[in-house]
Image (spheres, grey):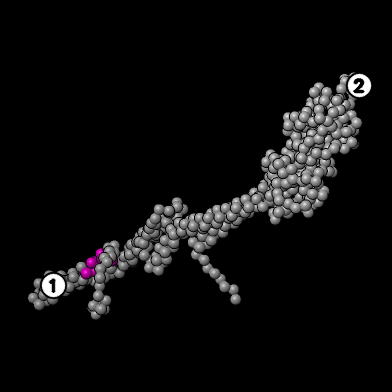
Amino acid sequence: MAVRVSLSLRNRVFLACAFVAAIVITIGTLFVTQRVSTAAEAQLLKQLAQSGEIVEEQHRDRLDTLRLLASLIADLPKLKAAVSTNDAPTVAPIAIDYMRLVGSDFVSITNDGGETLAAFGPFAFEIPEAIVEESDGKHGSTSFHQTPGGAVEIVTYPITIGQVAPERLGTLSFGFSINEDLAERLGNLSQSDVIIVTRERVLASTLSLGFSDAPRLFDLANTREIELAGKDWVALPVALFGEEIRAVTLLSRNERSAFLSAFRQGVILAAALGALLAILLSYVVARTVTQPLGAIARTMREISETGDLARKIDLVGRWQDEDTRLVATTFNRLTASIARFQRESAVAERLSALGRMSAVLAHEIRNPLMIIKASLRAIRRPSALQEDVDDALQDIDHEVDRLNWMVGEVLDFARPLRVDNDTLDLTQLCQKR
């Protein structure tokens, strides 16, 4: 059995407004959060790509600067003169001075036979012969060397004499450590976390990682999501020395997730407050719309029950709109017109009845007149007795009263009705009747 639920106009307006507001706010909230999430993800990937470019550019600038310094120092006469002596004690102080001047972590100078004349640094080692052979006067050679304590980037330039057919006197090599300071500096410049790895181990990192993470980081091909140190990251590898060493830039997805979560909570809170405000406004709108209509409906119901067309619709309050005011004014004019029409109809009906009564009234008046005329004849007779005269006068008086009564009744019937409100005892009225 179907149950029919009847809702008032106020409830229908309120539910409709609240439903529309809730739908709009919900859709708006979902749209905003979705767009912000998409924009945040795009911004995260864009920032990661920029961080990778910065790391690659900084590394390239570092090597270019190191090459320039090495080429300039390798062409200094003082260094050439010291190397030409092939005397290690003579070369050693010059090598230390140049290492301090360049600010490198390692320096090595060899003679034309590849023998090391001077090598200084925390990880001093001999430059491999292949690197020495690869170096030339224009570009030198760049290499990467792992040590038990870390790793170093090395730039090697030949030390030559002569312009037309330069003679090689030896080689000059400067090296910079790949350590935590380098990772920290690259991380600060790129606004990201940086991990420098080989296939076997992590060389430097701004995070606390173990050796087991190195292969997984080294094998990254493109932008990937990865879990490290108990957090979710977006990682981008940057090749530094081909297949030998890579720098991985990372941005925390947890930080973005925390931001999005806080933003989402703020949006949801704002949406909830907006929905609450919309519901309150819907109730106010429903009330302001339906309250005048309710007053109109109540007045119409009272008129239909009592038939009192003199009752008027009186709208109170400040929030009546023009339409309800027009309806109330039109209804009041309509009831006034109907009441006036009823009054006019009643008068017309009485006048019509009065016209119909004229024939009866003429007949009724004629009878008393005939009696009066006959009585007057009886009085005029010379032989009329006093007793007959008295009877005739009595008949005339009676018929005159009768005529006066009929005229009064007619006038009362034709006179407009006048109603006076007063208290009345129904018991006494019934007893009189």
Up-down: is 198 above or below 66? below
Compared across the picture, whether 99 is left or right of 258 comes to: right
Q: Give the main secondary structure of the magenta stretch.
A: helix
Q: What is the secondary structure assignment of the residue under circle 2? A: loop
**In this rendering, the label closer to the viewer, 1 or 2:** 2
Asked if the stretch drawn in magenta spans residue 408, the answer is: yes
Q: Which amino acid does the dot numbered 1 rest on?
A: Leu
Q: Which residue is mark 1?
A: 393
> In the rendered image, is residue 216 in sight?
yes
> In the rendered image, is residue 42 in sight?
no
Q: Which amino acid does the dot numbered 2 rest on?
A: Ala
Compared across the picture, whether 378 is left or right of 305 comes to: left
Along the line of sight, which residue is nearer the eye, 260 or 217?
A: 217
Circle number at residue 431: none
Compared across the picture, whether 170 is left or right of 432 comes to: right
- Answer few, some or many: residues within 10 Å of disc 1's Cα (few below 14, many 20 plus, some between 14 and 19): some
Q: Are marks 1 and 2 in contact (CB under 8 Å)?
A: no
Along the line of sight, which residue is nearer the eye, 263 or 157?
A: 157
- The image shows residue 34 at horizontal and vertical percentages of 66, 52
Up-down: is 309 above or below 84? below
Q: What is the secondary structure assignment of the residue under circle 1? A: helix
- Answer few, some or many: residues within 10 Å of disc 2's Cα (few below 14, many 20 plus, some between 14 and 19): few
Q: Split into 4 quadrants, where in the image is the N terminus?
A: bottom right
| Residue pictured at 55% horizontal, 56% vertical | 272
Residues in magenta, as a range: 405-414
| Residue pictured at 75% horizontal, 53% vertical | 210
| Residue pictured at 81% horizontal, 30% vertical | 89
Asked if the stretch drawn in magenta spans residue 290, the answer is: no
Name the image quarter holding residue 83. Answer: top right
Q: Which residue is mark 2?
A: 165
Along the line of sight, which residue is nearer the eye, 141 or 367?
A: 141
